[in-house]
Amino acid sequence: MLTLLSYTMIVCFMYLVMSKRLSPLVALILVPVAFASLGGFATQLGPMMFDGVKMLAPTGIMLTFAILYFCMMTDAGLFNPLIKLILKCVKGDPLKIVIGSAVLGICVGLDGDGATTYIITTAALLPLYRRTGMSLQVLATVLLLTNGVMNILPWAGPFSRAASAMHVDITELFIEMLPLMIAGVGWVIFAAFYLGRRERRRLGVVQLDHDEVMS
């Protein structure tokens, strides 16, 4: 019964937000309260809310700091030298371009925000992919793999929510997951190498001058 109620709540929340009948903030407040009341928890809402805030407050503070810090670093041009270096090294070789995409995605993904990874990496490499005729699906695939690995960082949303849901210390969980994360990074580089070699066989090495690469 609770499972059915939970899925119904999610569907109702998505419908109200996507149809613009409620703003996300209002829907996040009203929908859980309404469904908790339907489930017979109306008298327990106060203590449940208090316990939820206590449990999620450290995670929320960490996420807020990470978002503000890395947004400030991005605006200050933290990743610009790395982007220029990668673009200078890959030139017109599809294999190097895909591996460079993976390296850039991993470095930018240190902020734990998948949206930032897509924005910065795509803005830097999309013109190069189009100029060389490479498949944009390769770029999307590499970035998806990268985000999956970098979401294991303690300040990443999925990892912090998982730690909160399991009621475990986020630092201890990250230490246990660290070998898996390292293996994941290795797999991303290997997958990028495989996809890049396929693109090199299909397209060959495209000759680009320095100005085209850095533009």
Image (cartoon, rainbow, N blue to C red):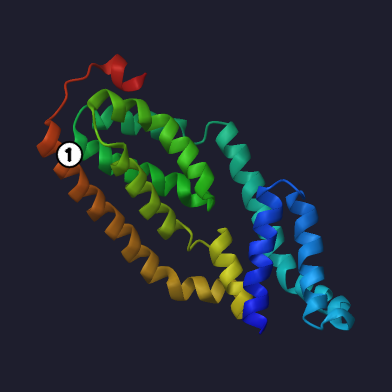
The answer to which image quadrant residue 96 occupies is top left
The relative height of residue 134 versus residue 146 in the rendered view (above or below) is above
Q: Which quarter of the figure is the N terminus placed in?
A: bottom right
Residue 136 at x, y percent in the picture: 31, 37
Task: Find disc 1 in the rendering and name its residue.
Answer: 199
Left or right: 62 as drawn, with respect to 31 = left
Instruction: Check the image and report above or below for 13 versus 126.
Output: below
Q: Is the residue 204 above or below the residue 156 in the image?
A: above
Residue found 53% across the figure and 53% down from its top: 112
Q: Quadrant of residue 38?
A: bottom right
Give the x, y percent position of residue 66. Answer: 62, 51
Position above or below: 88 against 65: above
Q: Residues within 10 Å of mark 1 (few under 14, many from 20)?
A: many
Observer-nearest of 21 and 27: 21
> At which x and y percent is residue 35?
77, 72
Amino acid at dot 1: Glu
Residue 8 appears in the rendering: yes
Residue for point 80% across, 54% down: 26
Image point 68% across, 47% down: which residue? 19
Answer with left or right where residue 101 lies relative to residue 2.
left
Q: Position of residue 67 (x, y in %)?
A: 63, 48
